[in-house]
Amino acid sequence: MLQMAICLAVGIFLGTYIVVPVGTAFALIGVALLLLYAYVVSRNGWVPFLALSFFFIDVGWVRAQLGDFFILPTFLVEWGTSVSSSVSSVIHQVGLCETSSSLLSAMLLGQRSLLSPSLVDLYRQTGASHILALSGLHLGILFGLFNFILVRSVQYRIRYLIGFIEICLMWGYALVAGFPSSLCRASLMLSVFIIGQVRLVGNSGVHALGLAAFLLLLISPDSLFDVGFQLSFMAVSGILFIYPALTGLWHPHHRLSTWLYKVVALSFSAQIVTLPLLLHYFHSFVLSSLLFSPIYIMLATAILYAALFMLLTYPVGVAFLFSFCVEVLISLQHSLMSLVSNLSFSRAEHLIFSLDQVVLSYAALLCLLPVLYVLRVPDVPLPRLRMALFFRSWPYLLAALLLLFMTFFLST
């Protein structure tokens, strides 16, 4: 599925810059159908695989010139808007200060227009802007309880009901939030995961990522050039490929240290893969985010859960208990951010990162992956035998170092 998504992306890229007449587009569709038939007839060898790749490249080429299509009934849009307005009014009626209520509206509903410029700048300076934008982080936090129940009921028929409810709630939440692109990507990807768990056919993250990318590009080809689309899928790719290698490097003996290490490894995996794109588009990077991002995520998790309980208990009149917790957690988070923003080494700016350097950086990361996976072999004791395996992977390490050196050389 990931190969199909890549071929579709290549076709969209070509179709965006090379425009063909309508008749040629239909001719391309005919050629693509013949290639698909060649794949169906004989599915062995490199020729059918090449035919399938060309088919999806042609599909992407044609889709890039047809434009977007997305049809949603008007009554659903009106219902989502009314629910969003009701939740927003509750948030502003539970006794929170203006800063906290506007922050919750942004974190829960994506209403960033209520945030003050100084608060937005504080999150930007500390590298925590992803907390304000609705994404897979928020979706995973809000529906973590359903995932917990689903995993433990996977051997029973109740898993179908739990999975169906979770998918409906996720897309309902996306509707209430106004279908932001980042939340739609996360909802689609998590839906694929849930279907895989419910059907007991596995939940390969790579296939879920590829299917989500394929469907989103098929619906909206312009998403390929959206910075949020690129950053979100690169972040998930880092989690899928680098996070397992990092978690295998060290196995703490205590549960707390294991959990903390996994949180740090998860955050680092996403940040190291998105770093080249961030430097290319924004020419700056928050150095302190490598250290403090896991803390921001833990505080955001606590804030969202407290806000969720606050909304659920509002009808019975005890929401003030959770609103107090929300105020304390938000004050703690902003105090930490203010402290971090005053550090002299917290931010590197005016960094020019060309497209060539982006490509070389990702090539270096790909070369480093085999080294990481050799070091995480669980059956090899440390340190002697695993170091022997490490030195067997020296060509990959050397290639990565050479590419990194070339990246640095291009910037001088």
Image: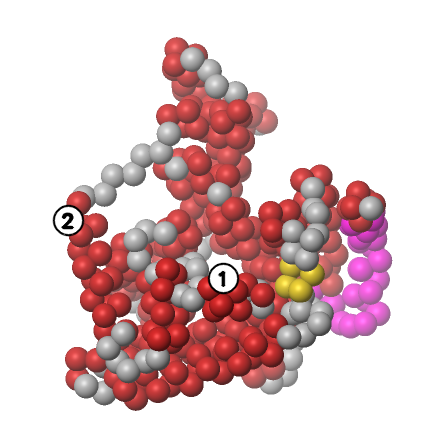
* Residue 234 located within the stretch drawn in magenta: no
Residue identified by numbered label 2:
75
Identify which residue, 136 or 371, lies in the foreground. Answer: 136
Amino acid type at mark 2: Phe
Which residues make up the magenta segment?
376-405
Q: How crowded is the residue under tag 1: few (<14 C-alpha within 10 Å), some, or many (20+)? A: some
The spot of residue 163 in percent (x, y) is: 30, 61
Q: Earlier in the sequence, mark 2 or mark 1?
A: 2
The spot of residue 202 in percent (x, y) is: 43, 55
The numbered mark at residue 280 is none
Residue identified by numbered label 1:
130
Q: Is residue 67 above or below residue 376?
A: above
Q: Is residue 371 above or below residue 253?
A: above
In this orientation, does residue 139 appear? Answer: no
Q: Is residue 289 above or below residue 372?
A: below
Are the two marked residues, 2 and 1, in contact with CB atoms closer than 8 angstroms? Answer: no
Amino acid type at mark 1: His
